[in-house]
Image: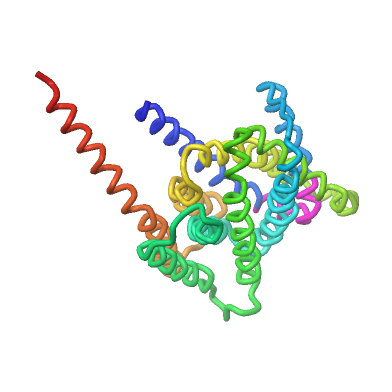
Amino acid sequence: MIARLRSSVLGLMILHVAINSCGYLFVKVGLAEFTPFAFAFWRFSFGMVGLVLIFLLRRAWIHVEKRDWPRFLLLGALAVPANQLLYLNGMRLTVPSHASLLYGATAAAALGLSAVLGYERLRLFKVLAILVSLCGLVLVVSESPTPIIGTENFAGDILIAISVVVWAGYTVLAKPVVDKYGPVRATLVCLILGSAMALPFLVAPALAQDYAVVTWRGWIGTLYTGFMITAVSYTIWFALLRRVDPSQVAILTTPQPVVTTALSVLILKEAIGASLILGGLLVIGGVILMQAPTLFRRKQRMETSRTLHLGDQP
């Protein structure tokens, strides 16, 4: 049972990292041809199609209890209008490596919110881990050949950082409904509600978009982020959330900034400097430090269990 759980979490982690690492690049390419709000309109539209297909294939019928509707409405608002519009506008101004590393700090934000809500206890080593991650983020955001304040990268990084806080809130607040309704059903309801809130405000920008400048690359960006990120990746995220605690979900995705940065350098020819590398190491190191005692205790329990098992053998 434990082995199956471990393998399922590992498989979901690898899939999530692969999908999301490529997602930053597809968003950047798409935003080179679309305005952020027009891109959001098509992303959410394609994402809805993907979610409905998953819904029909899995027969994920759901009856939301009346008392759960306020939480679902809040989650929908956080997931789509707040998180995604901040993220897309930030991505227009910054680079994939910065965005991915900033999202690598989700664990720190999720831990803080979990502690406030009473889901997890705030311990000294976790506070230190958060400080390490924050130091890394300062280095990442400060990487610029020109003064920080007023540059496009800085403005984009700030928008991404706010979207990270919103996403952390979404992740923590979603856990009760995920446990109750399951990841696919919870995702479906949240994103349908969120898209219903956002799409009416995105119709005008979508109609105003100059489609003469949009090539197949721009459309591929909307299709990939719509189907693979909005539908598939969100479902995987919630599936991970059902298996482990909110702050632990983020540690499983720590390879993502490394993969994203490598792809961005190879494909988009993004230049990286020492501050980005050092900052990235601090962000990832902080997230790993946050979970190190838990992983150590788990290893000790496994070794103790193995010793007792061998001792029982004739």
> Which residue is most to the left?
314
Q: Quadrant of residue 152?
A: bottom right
Instruction: Identify the residue at image location x=38%, y=33%.
Output: 6
Q: Is residue 235 magenta?
A: no
Q: Quadrant of residue 146?
A: bottom right
Where does the magenta region start and end?
28-41
* Quarter that holds the N terminus: top left
Question: Left or right: 104 with respect to 200?
Answer: left
* Quarter that holds the C terminus: top left
Q: Nearer the viewer, residue 115 or 216?
A: 115
> Which residue is most to the top?
314
Q: Position of residue 112 (x, y in %)?
A: 51, 61
Q: Position of residue 46 (x, y in %)?
A: 75, 37
The scheme the figure's colours follow is rainbow
Q: How many marks?
A: 0
Q: Nearer the viewer, residue 236 or 61?
A: 61
Q: Is residue 34 magenta?
A: yes
Instruction: Identify the residue at image location x=75%, y=43%.
Output: 69
Q: Position of residue 118 (x, y in %)?
A: 52, 56
Up-down relation of residue 168 to residue 18 (above or below): below
Q: Say whether residue 167 is visible.
A: yes
Instruction: Identify the residue at image location x=47%, y=46%.
Output: 245
Q: Quadrant of residue 57?
A: top right
Dominant secondary structure of the residues highlighted in magenta in the image? helix
Q: Say whether residue 270 is visible.
A: no
Up-down relation of residue 184 to residue 84 (above or below): above
Question: Left or right: 86 with respect to 95?
Answer: right
Up-down relation of residue 157 to residue 111 (above or below): below
Up-down relation of residue 152 to residue 216 (above or below): below
Question: Left or right: 86 with respect to 176?
Answer: right
